[in-house]
Amino acid sequence: QVQLVESGGGLVQPGGSLNLSCTAPGGLLKTYVTVWYRQPPGKERERLIYVNTSGQTLFSTSADAVKGRFTGARGDAGTTVWLQMNDLKPEDTAIYFCHAPILEAWGQGVQVTVSP
């Protein structure tokens, strides 16, 4: 089973920025739609944004809280998928995951903590 790998999480102050990345072995993500999710403490996992193979993005209907602040992107080679997060708020604290639905692959998740 393919294991995706997220990186770039950490502790940031409110108003700060983080850029998460998602990769797969052998550059496998190049040909698959990738989706970013997050799971806040004590809450269910929520879908944020789709990134297609051309780098076009589509926010989930449940992602109104991050629109205008978060951006999905795909690197030039197509093998890395990014989640750029700006103007972070304490309520953005969560474990962030990337997912390739066709591969049925998930990453292990990366912690993002927004705190003064």
Image: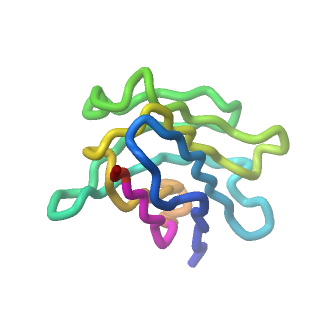
Residue 54 higher or lower than 43, as above or below: above
Q: Is residue 25 left or right of residue 2?
A: right
Which residue lies most toward the top here?
68
Q: Is residue 42 left or right of residue 107?
A: left
Residue 37 x, y percent position in the rendering: 39, 50
Which residue lies most toward the bottom here?
1
Q: Residue at x 29, y 46 (%)?
A: 90
Q: Is residue 112 magenta?
A: yes
Please provide the residue range marked out in magenta.
107-113
Residue 21 x, y percent position in the rendering: 63, 53
Q: Residue at x 82, y 38 (%)?
A: 76
Which residue lies most toward the left here?
42
Q: Residue at x 61, y 26 (%)?
A: 56
Residue 69 x, y percent position in the rendering: 44, 27
Which residue lies most toward the right here?
77
Residue 81 x, y percent position in the rendering: 65, 47
Q: Is residue 43 magenta?
A: no
Q: Is the N terminus in the top left, top right, bottom left or bottom right quadrant? A: bottom right
Q: Is residue 36 left or right of residue 30?
A: left
How are the colours assigned in the image?
Answer: rainbow
Q: Residue at x 59, y 58 (%)?
A: 8
Residue 4 higher or lower than 71, as above or below: below
Total numbered labels placed on residues in the image: 0
| Residue sitting nearer the eye, 33 or 66 | 66
| Residue sitting nearer the eye, 88 or 60 | 88
